[in-house]
Image (tube, rainbow, N blue to C red):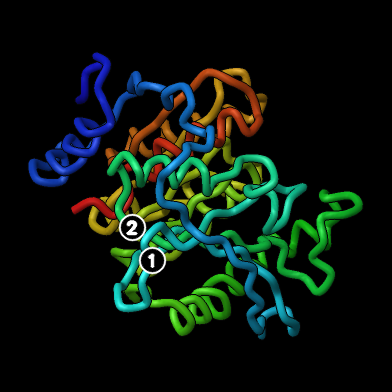
Amino acid sequence: MMNKDKVNLTSIFTFIILLFLFGDYAYSQQSIEQAPEGFDVETANIGRGVIETVEYESETVGTKRKANIYTPPGYSENQQYPVLYLLHGIGGDEEEWLNNAKPQIILDNLYAEGELEPMIVVMPNGRAMEDDRAIGNPFEQEKIEAFARFEQDLLTDLIPFVEETYPVIQDREYRALAGLSMGGGQSLNFGLGNLDMFAWVGGFSSAPNTKEPEELLPNPDAAKEKLNLLWISCGVDDNLLHVSRRTHEYLEEHQVPHIYYEEPGDHDFDVWKNDLYLFSKLLFKS
């Protein structure tokens, strides 16, 4: 069992590898350093990624749907990249991360510091319905069903579009899924429900749409074998903390390797920006 001394993120990732090598699959709560001051402030004279809005045909919905795609500094069509699919919350859409967190600034800064593996980041609309605008009551049954339907849209429409349009590595080892709140629940549901598609999964302040642990991961041994990283985090003042805790407790009981992080803060973008910073640094490291 890991002790509770403060460790940096490099040692955390090293510990993951050691656990897989030596078979000790249990995790305890860890003291993880917060992102440093200025991590989300634009830095001058560094390389910058590019964001473009794309449309893809969704057979699931029967219409064209939008997504925002970030390509990293120095992006080249002659290079192949892993992909992070980054999901929004119940009241948002494909613009929510961009409008509230400026993830491109966080990622650009990390690239400038040599902290990230080059990756493409896809920010879709996780509400798979014909009128997918972030308007009206987000808790209407039709919209809740649309969030669940996004699993099919993601797997059968969006991922194939990305892999046909961009030079990405078409392998589960190079595919990550993470999100905030409702998107955190989607990420855990879809990621752990499709281990043949995703090797890296993160839930930030996951909402009550997250399946009960026994349904979320009925076969813990499969997760032990296939996951490279499972991240669960939530603010200590968040009213939804119980969702992350129950998931963590089940994973710990069944000795499924994961990082569990209760951090300062509530259900807001100060927490989720910090999560993106910490989670992205761990992705696609060999």
Q: CA distance from mark 1 to mark 2?
A: 8 Å
| Residue type at the position of mark 1 | Tyr
Q: Residues within 10 Å of mark 2 (few under 14, many from 20)?
A: many
| Residue type at the position of mark 2 | Pro
- The quadrant of the rendering that contains the N terminus is top left
The numbered dot on residue 75 is 1
**Secondary structure beneath label 2:** loop
Q: Position of residue 167 (x, y in %)?
A: 38, 77
Q: Is residue 137 left or right of residue 30?
A: right
Name the residue that disc number 2 marks: 118
Locate residue 197: give its quadrant.
bottom left
Where 191 sits versus 168, above or below? Answer: above
Q: Nearer the viewer, residue 102 or 19?
A: 102
Q: How many marks?
A: 2
Which of label 1 and label 2 is nearer to you?
Answer: 1
Where 76 sits versus 190, above or below? Answer: below
Q: Position of residue 217 (x, y in %)?
A: 42, 52
**Residue positioned 59% across, 28% down in the render:** 270
Q: Residue furthest left?
A: 22
**Label 1 close to label 2 by CB (< 8 Å):** yes
